[in-house]
Image (spheres, rainbow, N blue to C red):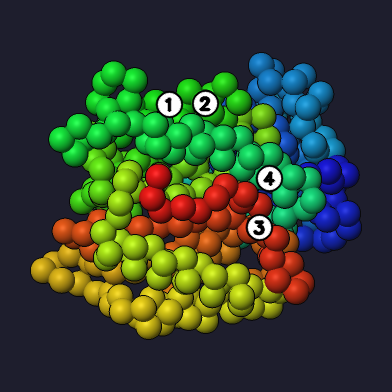
Amino acid sequence: MNLEPGTWNGERRTVVTRLIIAASETDANLFYATRFLAPDAFVFVLTPTGEKVLLMSDLEVDRARAQAAVDTVLPIRHFEERAKASGVERPGILDSVCAFLAEREIRTVRVPGSFPIEYGDGLRERGVAVQVRREPFFEERLLKTADEVEAISRAMQRTEAAMGAAIGAIREAEVHDGVLRWRGTTLTAERVRRLISMTLIEDGLLAQHTIVACGEAGCDPHNEGSGPLRAGQSIIIDIFPRDEASRYFADITRTVVKGRASDMLRKMYWAVAAGQERVFALLRDGSDGEAIHRDVQATLERHGFQSGEVNGRMQGFFHGTGHGLGLEVHELPRISKLPTILGSGNVVTVEPGLYYPGIGGVRIEDVVVVTETGYTNLTRYPKELEV
């Protein structure tokens, strides 16, 4: 994303002062606002004039001045000194922030919901009004720029290579007593995950919690899977790594069966594929995410697959149809039971699924960009059930 300092989408505008105190390595809003990556907490202020200001430790101030996409970088030490001069014996980050706000005559700040309560309470105790803004803290994050879409697309291409390595191993595997063996040893979920991780690391991506869930494990959508992979059972592979250079995520899911799938698994697979096609048919600028989700539910039901709780466990289709993707693997907007109007520039996953204990799970996931008249699919990896 290329934005000039002090601007949002190229236009200066007056806003209530926004304040973030966090580490940009773990806070997507802070990284989005600054394009500066740091493991320790620092202070970001967006003033009513549109000026973006950082208060940095001496350790990071020079690097921030060279790398951060902001207008002003100030040593936080200067404001510690002012707090000390006012009588604070051992000033901390809150004292420095208050000194800065007082200097700028700022009496109201808007903070994200993740803002530390100790800082929020401390600011209020010192007479600063604190407003909490629910996500999206920066609405601009919802509509991806061309640069952001390109970053996600590049991450997707390399993630698809890892998917290819995983499915390639399953395709090459031999079957012994129903268990897959590859290159002389048992092919396990853990081994496939390592193969995926190694492929991604070599391409500059980092994956965590990759799912390789076979059979019954696939009935829990977030079960990462373990143990030997078996022929004739569905294997859900869900890979969602972060590009270490751009910080943007990719996300893809494929479901495969080694050998011949049962008639029920085939019916589930084609029902899920039909549900995904319904999303593609309905997506466009201004489309209703909740209505799309309900349509997917109805499509799966028309194919004979009901959803609900059975013996204390959910089965069928019981998660959202999709979610936003960007600097976080799960971000707004969502295609789910919650009201959402989708807009041109949203990047979302499309991932219906079906899960039945005793049969297995099926999920297919692509990443798309919503456009004025439809969508652009950033996912190229083929969809095939039997390998």
Instruction: Look at the image and tell me whether residue 355 can be seen.
Output: no
At label 4, the amino acid type is: Ser
**Residue 209 at what x, y percent from top left?**
39, 38
Mark pair 2, 1: CA separation: 6 Å
- Tag 2 near tag 1, CB within 8 Å: yes
Mark pair 3, 4: CA separation: 10 Å
- Tag 1 near tag 3, CB within 8 Å: no
Identify which residue is drawn at 39% across, 26% down. 194
Is residue 368 rendered to the left or right of residue 351?
A: right
Mark pair 4, 1: CA separation: 22 Å
| Pointer 4 residue | 153
Q: Considering depth in this image, is 354 or 328 the residue closer to the camera? A: 354
Q: In terms of sequence position, does the residue under pointer 4 or pointer 2 come before the other?
A: 4
| Pointer 1 residue | 195
Q: Categorize mark 2 by other alpha carbons within 10 Å: few (<14), some (14-19), many (20+).
A: many
Identify which residue is drawn at 19% across, 39% down. 178
**Residue 33 at what x, y percent from top left?**
71, 44
Name the quarter where the N terminus is drawn: top right
Identify which residue is drawn at 30% across, 55% down. 261
Q: In terms of sequence position, does the residue under pointer 1 or pointer 3 come before the other?
A: 1
Name the quarter where the C terminus is drawn: top left
At label 2, the amino acid type is: Thr
At label 3, the amino acid type is: Asn
| Pointer 3 residue | 377
